[in-house]
Image (cartoon, helix red, strand yellow):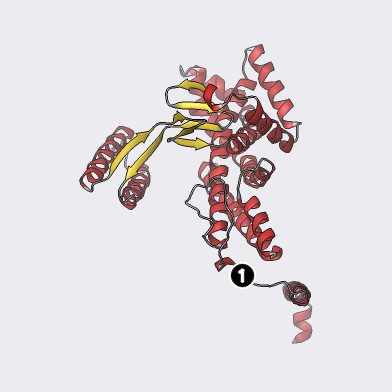
């Protein structure tokens, strides 16, 4: 019987895979044991118990509240939220800018096509770290002092200290607002899914429902005693107070990431549109559509099937490129991890946490983009 199993190709394949798995487990076990033994011999603490200790270091800016008296675990959370916030804004803005540049690259206007072509070529062939340092130097040297800040629109000021914007301030229990927003998002998703199988539920009805829900939410918030107001930045002394501040470091990393990523996205979009046959444009004109309507209703939906896979790779690169923010001093996860290592000396644990976080973010982005790719893919019957 053993001889017959050996001559079975499936049995041999399974045996080889099991042996390879055991060999990998043995190698990682040896590495782990050897590392722990060597660190212990040098008096270096090993384990994750440091996460519960007090951090005792500041973080210059954060999306969530942070205090140096918080734990190292919360410092990691702050770094993670900064990274997610940075990634989300960079992906959204670079996609919008990339779409405009990609369409401009295809423009029949020779000046527009030439300018966008030079933009794409110059940006794609310049290292990202160099661009980030350039924008940071520009933000910290070329802009005026707070007393002479640019004021393009009422309530918005641009200076060496950063960008100051109006801020919505809510007094009271904000958990109610988050609950209203969560329920509203769930209802909107349900309405969109329901609309696919019920033609009577038009976009106009959905829009009216959104307006009614917002009115009801505002009424509930008013009854619950929530008070919302807008605070504007004001110059007092040598700096602005009030409002919301976007630091020079944040502005530099956002501008650099958006401009760099948009150049790659522009080429992806241009290539996807060019891959759609010219007959589709002619068909659109034949039924009386303008070029803009043909692009939005016929060409773009078909081009998405080509655009989505390389766009996924570009989004993943954008998330990983956020680690370069430490070059300009923005406290994303990489900078926080470096500070934690200097404070605790536990480099291996901190780097493993960082690797696990970025792996989780990348897998989440891939899963979402793969799901969307399946939605727009052609169904073979």
Q: Is residue 30 visible?
A: yes
Residue found 69% across the figure and 16% down from its top: 114
Q: How many marks?
A: 1
| Quarter residue 340 falls in | bottom right
Q: Residue furthest bottom?
A: 1
Q: Is residue 149 visible?
A: no
Residue found 50% across the figure and 36% down from its top: 245
Identify the residue under disc 1.
48
Q: Residue furthest left?
A: 223
Image-based side of 157 in relation to 118, left or right: left
Q: Secondary structure at mark 1?
A: loop
| Quarter residue 92 falls in | top right
Question: Quadrant location of the N terminus?
Answer: bottom right
Query: Mark 1: few, some, or many residues within 10 Å (few <14, many ≥20)?
Result: few
Percent from the top left, x then y, of residue 140? 64, 31
Image-based side of 291 in relation to 115, left or right: left
- In depth, the one of 231 and 327 nearer the eye is 231
Residue found 49% across the figure and 26% down from its top: 157
Residue 114 vertical position relative to residue 132 in the rendered view, above or below: above
Residue 259 vertical position relative to residue 380 in the rendered view, above or below: above
Image-based side of 152 in relation to 124, left or right: left
């Amino acid at each position: 019987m053993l001889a017959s199993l050996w001559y079975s190709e499936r049995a041999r394949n399974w045996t080889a895979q099991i042996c390879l798995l055991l060999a990998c487990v043995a190698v990682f076990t040896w590495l782990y044991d050897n590392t722990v033994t060597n660190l212990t011999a040098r008096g270096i603490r090993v384990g994750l118990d440091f996460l519960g200790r007090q951090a005792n270091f500041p973080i210059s800016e954060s999306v969530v509240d942070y205090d140096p008296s918080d734990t190292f675990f919360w410092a990691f959370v702050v770094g993670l939220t900064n990274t997610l916030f940075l990634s989300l804004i960079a992906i959204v803005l670079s996609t919008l800018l990339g779409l405009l540049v990609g369409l401009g690259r295809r423009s029949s206007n020779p000046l527009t096509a030439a300018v966008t072509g030079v933009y794409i070529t110059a940006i794609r062939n310049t290292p990202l770290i160099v661009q980030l340092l350039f924008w940071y130097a520009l933000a910290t040297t070329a802009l005026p002092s707070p007393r002479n800040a640019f004021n393009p629109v009422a309530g918005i000021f641009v200076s060496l200290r950063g960008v100051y914007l109006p801020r919505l301030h809510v007094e009271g229990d904000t958990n109610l607002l988050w609950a209203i927003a969560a329920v509203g998002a769930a209802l909107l998703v349900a309405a969109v899914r329901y609309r696919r199988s019920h033609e009577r539920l038009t976009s106009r009805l959905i829009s009216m429902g959104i307006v009614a829900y917002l009115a009801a939410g505002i009424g509930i918030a008013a009854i619950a005693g929530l008070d919302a107001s807008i605070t504007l930045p004001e110059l007092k002394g040598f700096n602005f107070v009030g409002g919301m501040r976007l630091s020079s470091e944040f502005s530099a990393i956002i501008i650099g990431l958006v401009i760099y990523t948009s150049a790659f996205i522009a080429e992806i979009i241009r290539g996807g549109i060019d891959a759609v046959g010219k007959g589709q444009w002619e068909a659109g004109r034949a039924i009386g559509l303008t070029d803009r309507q043909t692009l939005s209703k016929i060409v773009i939906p078909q081009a998405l099937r080509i655009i989505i896979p390389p766009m996924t790779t570009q989004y993943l690169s954008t998330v990983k490129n956020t680690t370069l923010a430490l070059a300009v001093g923005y406290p994303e996860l990489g900078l926080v991890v470096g500070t934690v290592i200097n404070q605790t000396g536990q480099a291996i644990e901190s780097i493993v946490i960082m690797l696990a976080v970025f792996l989780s973010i990348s897998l989440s982005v891939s899963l979402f983009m793969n799901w969307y790719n399946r939605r727009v893919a052609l169904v073979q019957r």
